[in-house]
Image: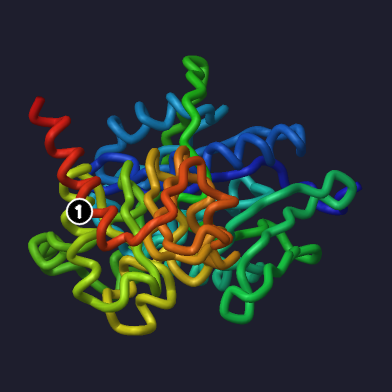
Amino acid sequence: MSKFTNKNIWVFIETDGGKAKSVGLELLNPGRMLADKAKEELVAVVLGKDNTEAVGQVQQYGADRIISVEGEEYEKYSFDAYTYAMAELVEKYQPSAILIGATNNGRDFGPRLSCRLKTGLTADCTSLDYEELSGNIAWTRPAFGGNLMAVIMCPDTRPQIGTVRPGVFKKTLVEKEDAQVVKEEIKVPADRIRTRLIESVREAAAGAVNLEDAEVIVAGGRGMGGAEGFRLLEDLAQALGGAVGASRAAVDAGWIGHAHQVGQTGKTVGPKLYIACGISGAIQHLAGMSGSDCIVAVNKDPEAPIFKAADYGIAGNLFEVLPVLAKEIRRLKES
């Protein structure tokens, strides 16, 4: 039996322009599982200038309660304002655990919050479970470059905090019309905000890859032979309206940027369609894409491990297969 009186599983809902980011909605799925095992409530926490739309989105994904904090200081992410507000909420409600998406903001916010609360944090998790006797969450994350998985617990302090990779869990619609919305007013003292966002330039990231939200990913590995081979992937991805991914081997070789890397040391994705081209199927890569709805493997080696994980396989020369696939897909779309 847990020695703590803290209760309820919290999920931090990161927002952008008043809309909930996908990762927060994804985390309501494991949050529901943890809350049910603990026989506690699932609580979503939203910070923003106007949370009306984000709260409406959260109500579709199964939270029992939604805590909404609105204010000018929360319009854009600020580690000073967000940490202050969340620490105030934790002091008032005493949650058992807080799940935070391992986004750029989440990886900044989580450690600052845990330090402020003098509790532990497990970063970049890929799996979660709950120990009923102790009340501890089992946070699983890659360690030693992804060569093994570590299970970490926080038995001595509360709340337990962890950042979880986007794309690990799928959003699950669970309408809860009776979800209670609690509006909290927290004003951050001006002297507590030490940084100020002057300008946000979205154009700078216009060409950035967004693998976590892509419904189709065409990924390449060592078998692509070089950076030139990725042009075939770009052509196929364009025909499918998808994004280009890569294995660690291809990224380490300098054929494509790290933002495209899928796997334990890259991004975890769960698209509707994942096409693995010239990828052998190392366990580190499979851990990052095994949640895909449909996996298609293209590899000249019929014994490659990737075929065991694939729903469909093409044993052939990818330099001959991919152009034909792209051509046929475009023909079908035009017909």
Residue lying farthest to the top in this orientation: 177
Which picture quadrant has residue 246?
bottom left
Which picture quadrant has residue 247?
bottom left
Q: Which residue is depicted at the point 16% across and 49% down? A: 238
Q: Position of residue 224 (x, y in %)?
A: 32, 70
Query: Is residue 80 shown to the viewer in this render?
Result: no
Q: Which residue is depicted at the point 65% across and 33% down? A: 41
User: In the rendered image of this protein, does residue 172 appear above or below residue 130?
Assistant: above
Of residues 278 and 31, the one drawn nearer to the viewer in this rendering: 278
Q: Position of residue 264 (x, y in %)?
A: 53, 67
Amino acid type of disc 1? Pro
Of residues 298 and 118, the one drawn nearer to the viewer in this rendering: 298
Q: Which residue is depicted at the point 51% across and 16% down? A: 178
Q: Which residue is depicted at the point 60% across and 54% down? A: 91
Of residues 267 and 24, the one drawn nearer to the viewer in this rendering: 267
Query: Is residue 137 shown to the viewer in this render?
Result: yes
Q: Position of residue 142 (x, y in %)?
A: 61, 69
Q: Position of residue 240 (x, y in %)?
A: 22, 42
Q: Which residue is mark 1?
A: 323
Q: Is residue 27 left or right of residue 137?
A: left
Q: How many marks?
A: 1
User: In the rendered image of this protein, does residue 111 appear above or below residue 90?
Assistant: below
Q: Secondary structure at mark 1?
A: helix
Where the C terminus falls, by quadrant? top left
Q: Is residue 50 left or right of residue 135?
A: left
Residue lying farthest to the bottom in this orientation: 253
